[in-house]
Image (cartoon, grey):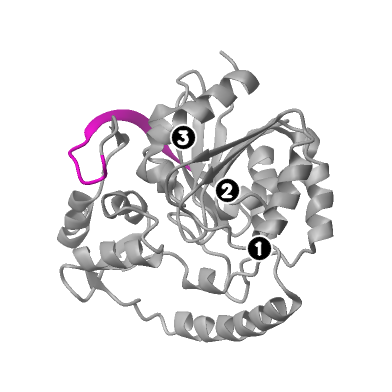
Amino acid sequence: MINQRSFRLLQKLTSGSKQNFRLAHGQSSSTSLKTLTKHYDEVTIPVPWGHIAGKWYGPKHVRPILGMHGWQDNAGTFDTLAPLLPPHLSFLSIDAPGHGHSSWLPPGVMYHSIDYVQLVLRIMEEYNWKTVSIMAHSMSSLNGFVFASLFPDKLDMLIGLDILKPLIRSPKYIVNMLSERLSDSLKLERRLRSNSEPPAYEWDQLVERLHHGTDKSVDLEACKYLLQRNSKPSSHEPHKYYFSRDNRLKTSLFYTLSNEMVLEMASRITAPHLFIKALQAPYYEDKKYYDAALEVLRQNPNFEYHEVEGTHHVHLNEPEKVAPIINSFISKCRPL
């Protein structure tokens, strides 16, 4: 039976198996919102270390578009966009390992971006898919780029949101980052072994911490969609909540690829590829590397590039800005 603290948490969140979403009609985030609902089912996908959790919208007999979120986000990142997608297709938004409701990696194992690329292959194997359609944001967008270059025959469509490709870093940055993250990962392991609960906050404080932790990329009113799968009520501090993702994600290892290697990967992407850049978001690297990859990608006749006003999480805050672009692209790749 659900305890009172858990019940209070559920009351604060968008709950149930029907997903609320907004139609802004030009309204700002401070105005009242019109909501509709769309049904989804919670699913679990077995993996060797546990399970991957997800939200499946639409019929089970239709191969879904696989939705993959950004670093330290979760399947809730597509809560507002999923109901706007074409109704003839299914959509499966997953929690990556260590995120949301998915299993954490075992003790002693570090998270690495390449694991998420292999995760796509695991999901395809579980559902017996010959090909996959991917819609991915941020960290997962660059992993979608990697998947598309390594397995071009297994992909029939890639939609990337805001981060185009693996980021190019200086040798000095890479060496310093590796040293720092390897050391910090051991500190986090010791903290996890203590079984101590993470810091807990009043609900409004939790929302503020998520909002500011994303450099205000996630609107205050949109934080609830991520917190639904990323928070739990404190067991010893009534009326407080803590972030429930795996803290080891903070020391995740990322790609250390050269620009030449990234350009080679870009040249191997042949599937239909849509990329949407949010204009109020940074490029996270020297823009010359971004532009160089974009030039190579544009040699693919099936590549589309669009820019929209908004933050890094524009797809969550203002899904109406990206939905028409995405739906037009989907209608070409997977029509009714």
Disc 2 target residue:
46
What is the secondary structure assignment of the residue under circle 2?
strand
Q: Quadrant of residue 9?
A: bottom left
**C-alpha gap between disc 1 and disc 2:** 39 Å
Residue at horizontal 51%, vertical 25%? 327
Q: Quadrant of residue 58?
A: top left
**C-alpha gap between disc 3 and disc 2:** 32 Å
Residue density around tag 1, few if under 14, some if 14–19, many if 20 or more, within 10 Å:
few
Q: Relative to 241, does residue 229 appear above or below in the rendering?
A: above
Disc 3 target residue:
322
Name the residue at the top extreme. 336
In the rendered structure, which segment of residues is drawn in magenta?
Answer: 28-43
Q: Estimate the x, y position of residue 318 in percent, counting from the top left.
A: 37, 40
Amino acid type at mark 3: Val
Q: Along the line of sight, which residue is nearer the eye, 81 or 173?
A: 173
Amino acid type at mark 1: Asp
Could you tell which of marks 3 and 2 lies nearer the N-terminus?
A: 2
Disc 1 target residue:
286
Q: Nearer the viewer, mark 1 or mark 3?
A: 1
Q: Quadrant of residue 176?
A: bottom right
Residue at horizontal 61%, vertical 67%? 111
Does residue 168 appear to the left or right of 317 in the view shown? right
Q: Estimate the x, y position of residue 78 in percent, counting from the top left.
A: 43, 41
Amino acid type at mark 2: Pro
Could you tell which of marks 1 and 3 lies nearer the N-terminus?
A: 1
| Residue 33 shown in magenta | yes
Q: Along the line of sight, which residue is nearer the eye, 248 or 6?
A: 248
